[in-house]
Image (cartoon, rainbow, N blue to C red):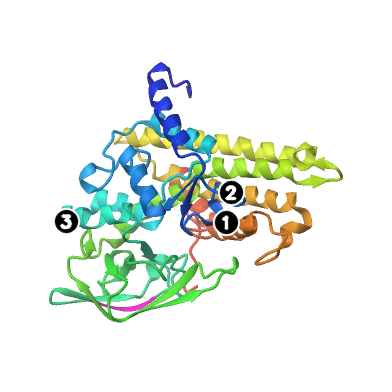
Amino acid sequence: MNLDFGNKYDEFRKEVKAFCKEYEGIHVTSNLYSYESVVDPNVKPKIEMSVKEWQKILIDKGYHARHIPNEYGGFGGELDIVKNVIITEEFSKSKIPTGIGGQGIDFLVPTLLEMGTEEQRQRYIKPALELEEIWCQGYSEPNAGSDLASLQTKGELEGDEWVINGQKIWTSTAKYAQMMFCLVRTEPDAPKHQGISYLLIPMDAPGIEVRPLVDMTLDAGFNEVFFTDVRIPADNIVGERGQGWLVANKTLVHERGSLGDPNKMIRRYDKLVNLMKSEILDGARIIDKPVYRDRLMRIQGKILALKSHGLRLLSGRLNKGQDISLATMIVKLYGTEMRYELESLAIDVMGELGTLYDNSPNLRDNGGWQYAYMYYLGLIIGGGTSQIQKNIIAERGLGMPKEPRIKGV
């Protein structure tokens, strides 16, 4: 792979550098950045603005939602792999926060662009991009986790409305989301993979109850959601009746590709390097200790490999006939496990301080490392466990025999 971009991109790099210089030291006021913040909390910011204001600036400049058509609220630029890389590199160097993604932007928007109606694109994409509507994902149920197609939440069409009853669990962001994209069983007599529909549900609809679930980060990052005779318009469906499994798999491709994002990994790696330069053991910096430095270099090599794989995925998107769904599963498998390895090194670097949590006065970076350590352990499970990812890659990618199925279990 030739990573020499050539002179024709020099002007674009200068443009991005100038933008980063203009907003150097910006602080975006939002809990959406949380532990990912690239701003030193001890330094008074030169510029401060809300996350919605920052998101709008980035979209207008083409540094976020770059390839989303303009008529749906995006920048409307052509797909250019090199420009994407340059934006990532310069933002990382300058410690400028990137745009916000999430379930609405990263998962739903590309699904609607591929399978939604024109009315749905016009209605939902722009508010998602501009963070006017936060989305959550209604997939897992108490008895349908890894075997998602066993879900039992029921949707019945009565006139021009769907009536929904059932329960979802492990629903991230549900407590403050305005919308949910949800899998519901609408064809009870069809085989389980063929009886599901993909519905768009307003979270303020009567009959919805959200109960937060505290996870091992000590934050209510998950929720359980209950539906009791919830009514939504009949046209709040993506694809056809019973086509929800197909639509959901389109969404899962985007989800798995975003969970191991190498761009976020690079920024986090830079913070880890700074941590290792500041932590002292036996009178010497941790980064000067061979055992720790070797672990750091192994992580750096893996990040570079993931970055190169990401470039290959972008190349695949340019070639419309190329199937990259399995390649994105590799991103999820490799990226989440590697991110946990990175956060684990940070915990070890801090020694006994790495065991602190919550409100201890000796926390580094406001406890962000401990939070991320727990959070990314969970993401090894989220979006399909590593074991499931390995099975799919082996069976569909390598042509190996399917895992034996035991009847009645």
Q: Position of residue 57 (x, y in %)?
A: 35, 44
Q: Between residue 223 and residue 327, name the one nearer to us.
A: 223
Identify the residue under disc 3.
Answer: 119
Q: Residue 306 — which label?
A: none
Of pointers 2 and 3, the one earlier in the residue sequence: 3
Q: CA distance from mark 1 to mark 2?
A: 7 Å
Spatial CA distance of label 2 from label 3 is 38 Å
- Disc 1 residue type (three-letter): Tyr
Asked if residue 373 can be seen in this view, the reply is no
> From this viewpoint, is residue 38 visible?
yes
What kind of element bears circle 2? helix
Q: Position of residue 340 (x, y in %)?
A: 61, 52
Residue 376: give its label.
Answer: 1
The residue that appears at 38% across and 64% down in the rendered structure is 136
Q: Residues within 10 Å of mark 3 (few under 14, many from 20)?
A: few
Q: What's drawn in magenta, residue-wise?
A: 163-167
Q: Is residue 165 magenta?
A: yes
Q: Name the secondary structure under disc 3.
A: helix
In the picture as drawn, the residue positioned furthest to the right comes out as: 282
For this view, does 286 lie left or right of residue 170? right
Mark 1 falls on what kind of element?
helix
Q: Is residue 286 above or below residue 355?
A: above
Query: Which numbered dot is residue 339?
Result: 2
Q: Is residue 159 above or below residue 340?
A: below
Three-letter amino acid code at the position of disc 3: Glu
Residue at (80, 39) in percent of width and height = 289
